[in-house]
Amino acid sequence: MDFFHDLGSFFIALLSFFVLVAWLMALFSIVADLFRDRELAGWAKAVWLFFLILIPLFTALIYVIVRGGGMAERAMAQAQASKAEADEYIRSVASGAVGEIAKAKELLDAGAITPEEFATLKAKALA
């Protein structure tokens, strides 16, 4: 009987830990959304934060009901902006090496540089 009591206590502790982590993730998502929203005035953000500290569960529930749709839209816009920035960086880095090699190839074709110099420029661009 003692084994089942210990096992039950373990699962209750595990469930409690899961609920705590889920609650903290939801709370951090709400606070991040508050600061991400540019349309909400500063005093309104302060009121939301005040009530999140004072009555956290009820305020979080109300926030998700009232502003949940906008919360998803802002998160989607943030993800798209991050993806666009990453894509632009990748394009700039990739085109930089390719552009240098293309210029070196044009110089080689024009006879301005030797094949050894072309190999050196190519290795330098790829490094």
Image: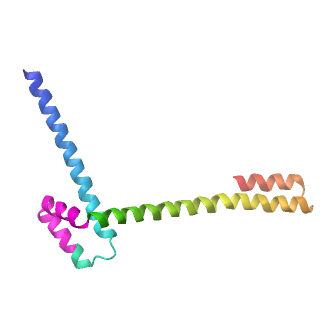
In the image, 75: left or right of 58? right
Q: Please report the residue visible at 32 percent of the width from the left and 71 percent of the height from the top.
A: 37
Q: Is residue 93 left or right of residue 76?
A: right
Image point 7% across, 20% down: which residue?
Answer: 1
Secondary structure mostly taken by the magenta-highlighted segment of the chain: helix
Depth check, front residue: 66 or 103: 66
- Say how the picture is coloured: rainbow
Whether the magenta-drawn stretch holds residue 60 is answered as yes
The answer to which image quadrant residue 31 occupies is bottom left
Tell me where residue 34 appears, x and y as whole percent: 28, 68
Determine which quarter of the picture holds residue 32: bottom left
Q: What stretch is highlighted in magenta?
A: 46-67
Q: What is the x, y in percent for residue 123?
A: 75, 51
Taking the view exactly as shown, the residue that stands out farthest to the left is 1
Q: Residue at x 91, y 63 (%)?
A: 110
**Residue 27 at what x, y percent from top left?**
23, 58
* Residue 67 point in image, percent of width and height: 25, 67
Q: Is 36 included in the stretch rendered in magenta? A: no
**Who is closer to the viewer here, 44 or 126?**
44
Q: In this view, does 60 lie to the left or right of 105?
A: left
Question: How many numbered markers are drawn?
Answer: 0
Q: Residue furthest right?
A: 111
